[in-house]
Structure formats: structure tokens, C-alpha cells
Image (cartoon, rainbow, N blue to C red):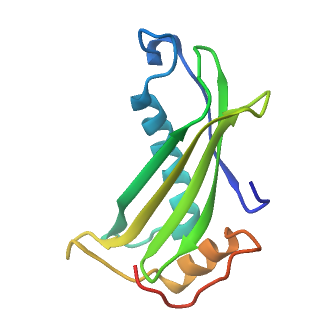
Amino acid sequence: MSIHALTTHVGVAHPWMCDTMGHMNVRHYAAMFDDASFQLLGHIAGVETESGRGWADVRSEVEYKHETKAGALITIRSRVIKLGRSSVTFEQVMSGTLDGVVHAVNRTTTVRFDLEARAAIALEPEARMRAEALLPDDVARPRDQSV
């Protein structure tokens, strides 16, 4: 991951999170990635002083790369990989805190959302600037693209 990645979750795979095969069940990967996304999107949106705006995920894909057993210490790092007019696509890498082994990679596209109108809205200029700062150096920083 680039230096533009943020640490967005640090946790442990508790025994109660594991299935009958002895590894963490997919529902708990989803919860950890979801918690991490709140951290990332908070960094992008900044302190929200007015209500009525949020985020709506429109796509999410997880690659499971390494078994996560009970007791595993894990860290999720998140980075922005693409920006649209109203959307942010980000990648989250879950890896072993002590050994760096990648356990899973999540890629999600979320849309800035007007909660009253129930419709996508353009990213605010300040949010766009914060999101652009999290793009890797080798990714172009577009100014206006469709969702």
C-alpha cells in the first residue's frame, strides 16, 4: 500500500467470530471492513456540522487471501483508488498486525448521498481535496467525472 493509506481498524479475531472450520466467518470480515470504512469516510467528509448527507455503498468485493484463525491480530489500512463526481472507490487491506500477511482485500465504491432526497450528490470541494490527498501518486486526480 502507498504512504497515502490510513490505518482504519486494529482488532483481533476472537474465537466467537470463527466458524466450524476454525477460521473467521465472512460476516466478521464484513463488519471489520465496514467499521474501517466509517473511519476512512470520516477522514474524507471531515467534521459534519450539518446533517442530511451520508454515503451509500453501490459495490463491494472481497478477496479472501489467507485464513484468519482465532487470536489473529489484524490491521486494516485503507486508501482511495478512484474518484468520480459523486463517488469514492477505496481499497482496504486486512493484514496480520505482527507478520504483515495479507488476509483479505476489500474494494468498495460508495456515493455521496443526500439523505432527504435519497439521491447522489456531488462530493463537496473540501471532501474531494481530502480524498485526492489519499490517492496514490501514480493515479490521476480527475476534476469532474460521472459517478
Please determine whether, in this image, residue 90 is positioned above or below residue 112: above
Identify the image quadrant of residue 122: bottom left
Please determine whether, in this image, residue 98 is positioned above or below residue 111: above
Residue 60 in the image, given as x and y percentages of width and height = 42, 53
Viewer-side residue, 85 vs 7: 85
Residue 49 seen anywhere in this rendered image of the structure: yes
Residue 134 in the image, given as x and y percentages of width and height = 67, 68
Residue 46 seen anywhere in this rendered image of the structure: no
Residue 91 in the image, given as x and y percentages of width and height = 58, 55
Instruction: Name, please, the residue furthest toward the bottom.
Output: 144
Instruction: Name, please, the residue furthest toward the left.
Output: 117
Please determine whether, in this image, residue 82 is positioned above or below residue 40: below
Residue 30 in the image, given as x and y percentages of width and height = 43, 38
| Residue at (61, 30) in percent of width and height | 11
112 lies left or right of 73: left
Viewer-side residue, 96 vs 117: 96
Please tell me how many numbered marks the rendered image carries: 0
Please determine whether, in this image, residue 64 is positioned above or below residue 15: below
| Residue at (46, 10) in percent of width and height | 21
Viewer-side residue, 53 vs 69: 69
84 lies left or right of 101: left
Q: Quadrant of the image for the N terminus?
A: bottom right
| Residue at (52, 17) in percent of width and height | 23
Identify the image quadrant of residue 65: top right
Q: Quadrant of the image for the C terminus?
A: bottom left
